Image: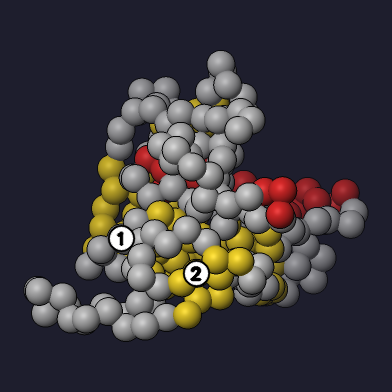
Amino acid sequence: ETSGILLVALTRESGRELNRQFREREISKTYVALVYGIIEDDNGTITLPLMADTKNRPCQIVDLENGKHATTEWKVRQRFVSRETLIHQNKHMIKENMTLLELNPITGRTHQLRVHLHAIGHPIVGDTLYNLEKTSRPMDESKGERLMLHAERICFKHPTTKAPMELVVEARFFNAEKEPLKEEEDGRNTTASEGNKCAVMGGGAINGNS
């Protein structure tokens, strides 16, 4: 469901080296996601341990006692208020408050970004696997609409030459007709910048930095 970059090794040797880089966390990845709600902080870190939901695979859940360490760094790229019009494939989406995030997963757990964002109350638009709270679907999959999560950038060493590599594919899953927000009361000037479903359990920590 996630669009963007997919890194594939062409030989076994290259595959082993790339797996090593992933395992040693030498590879840097950047995703972008459109999430529900306005996130007030400009950046922060989500630290929530994750484990498989054995009763509802392939879903993952937050488990503070038995989960594996998982960390996601995030940064706000743009905020959209409900009066703005978001356009997806030339169709108007539901007018709700939304935030466009840049995401850097420090760990690489299954569904990490989707579970972390849902757990802090900002599920990804179009996530029909974890987004239990939405009573109406935000998009119609039969018309080609999708999960608003995109693998935008990856940095790694070439498995043979060891030369540093950077691949970038910009997200194009939405356009926005934007208008600036009025200055808020605190003086801050913000620019409008059914199948299987999973339940995210437990609690954890989100460290936001304004």
Occupied quadrant, residue 38 = bottom left
Q: Looking at numbered disc 2 in the image, what kind of residue is underneath it?
A: Leu
Query: Which residue is tagged 2?
Result: 86
Pinpoint residue 159: horizontal percent, then vertical percent: 77, 62
| Res 22 seen here | no
Q: In the image, which is nearer the foreground, mark 1 or mark 2?
A: 2
Query: Which residue is tagged 1?
Result: 39
The correct choice, above or below, for 42 with respect to 122 in the image is below
Looking at this rendering, what residue extends furthest in the top direction?
A: 55
**Residue at x-position 55% and y-position 30%:** 197
Q: Looking at numbered disc 1 in the image, what kind of residue is underneath it?
A: Ile
C-alpha distance separating marks 1 and 2: 17 Å
Pinpoint residue 135: horizontal percent, then vertical percent: 44, 38
Q: Are marks 1 and 2 in contact (CB under 8 Å)?
A: no
Looking at this rendering, what residue extends furthest in the right direction?
A: 11
**Residue at x-position 37% and y-position 83%:** 179
Secondary element under disc 1, as helix, strand or loop, is loop
Taking the image as shown, residue 48 lies to the left or right of residue 52, namely left
The correct choice, above or below, for 120 with respect to 105 in the image is above
Colour scheme in the image?
secondary structure
Pinpoint residue 184: horizontal percent, then vertical percent: 15, 75
Looking at this rendering, what residue extends furthest in the left direction?
A: 186
Occupied quadrant, residue 190 = bottom left
Give residue 82's mark. none
Q: Quadrant of the C terminus?
A: bottom left
**Residue at x-position 42% and y-position 80%:** 178
The correct choice, above or below, for 98 with respect to 1 in the image is below
Occupied quadrant, residue 133 = top left
